[in-house]
Amino acid sequence: MKDVLTIIKDGEKTFKENYSLTPYPFSRQLFLIDDELYLKDNDVYQNINSIKGIVENGFKDKLTGCYTKNYLYSYIESLIAENADFALIFGDIDNFKEVNKIFGHFKADEILKTLGLTFKANINSADYIFRFGGDEFFIVSKACNLEKQLMLYKKINSEFYDRCNVSCSFGIKLYDKSLSIEDNLNSLDKLLYQSKFHGKNYILIGE
């Protein structure tokens, strides 16, 4: 049986019995109740949905609209605490240094922005994209079928290439609960390096 929640919305204190409660991925005090944002203070949930966009943007990289790497570890830790199964995807843009050098920073920024938009147009709303640095992106997905992930990122790569005439490479693997977060990310980094070794514009699934 669910606990009855005490909420404050539009200045009125009420009690909620039927609801969907989801912890916000990057905060211990923020919660989504029926898809509206609440701030928990002791045992009372204060509705702050009017500033949901502002709060969410505070977690994001301004150029790409993806979450910043500051929240990657905390999100993975929250999934570990739930004992959830999830996949990790690590990718970057092929020959991005040359793109930057030949076409300049403004064109490079436009390409990064386009990649962010391409990700968001294709991934599941429950997946989270993190800009790790430069042209590197981590995606954390609760969809654990790696063959389907392979097809998804082939589609993303194809659309991105059609838009920018630039390709990406990716490594995809399930999170290994027997390893630390750092070891999982290092393993994924090596997987991406191997995909580059295959000639770039390549997606490799790890064990």
Image: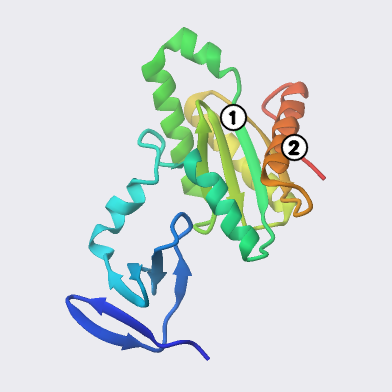
| Image x and y of residue 54, in percent | 28, 51
Q: Is residue 163 positioned above or below 21 on the image?
A: above
Q: Residue at horizontal 40%, vertical 67%?
A: 31
* Residue 38, above or below 78: below
Q: Is 149 positioned to the left or the right of 70 in the image?
A: right
- x%, y% of residue 124? 54, 56
Q: Secondary structure at mark 2?
A: helix
Tell me where residue 157 appears, x and y as whole percent: 59, 35
Left or right for 106, reference 186: left
Closer to the observer: label 1 or label 2? Answer: 2
Q: Seen in the image, is 49 located left or right of residue 137?
A: left
| Residue in view at x 58 percent, y 45 percent | 139
Callout count: 2
Q: Residues within 10 Å of mark 1 (few under 14, many from 20)?
A: many
Distance from disc 1 to disc 2, alpha carbons, whole Å, reads 15 Å
**Callout 2 amino acid:** Ser
**Residue appearing at x 36%, y 18% in the figure:** 106
Q: Is any part of residue 123 visible from this angle?
A: no
Q: Which mark is residue 187?
A: 2
Whether residue 40 is visible, yes or no, is yes
Picture quarter containing residue 142? bottom right
Residue at position x 50%, y 39% in the image: 69
Image quarter (top left, top right, bottom left or bottom right) of the C terminus = top right
Compared with residue 11, is residue 38 higher up or lower down, i.e. above or below? Answer: above
SS at circle 1 = strand
Residue pointed to by mark 1:
92
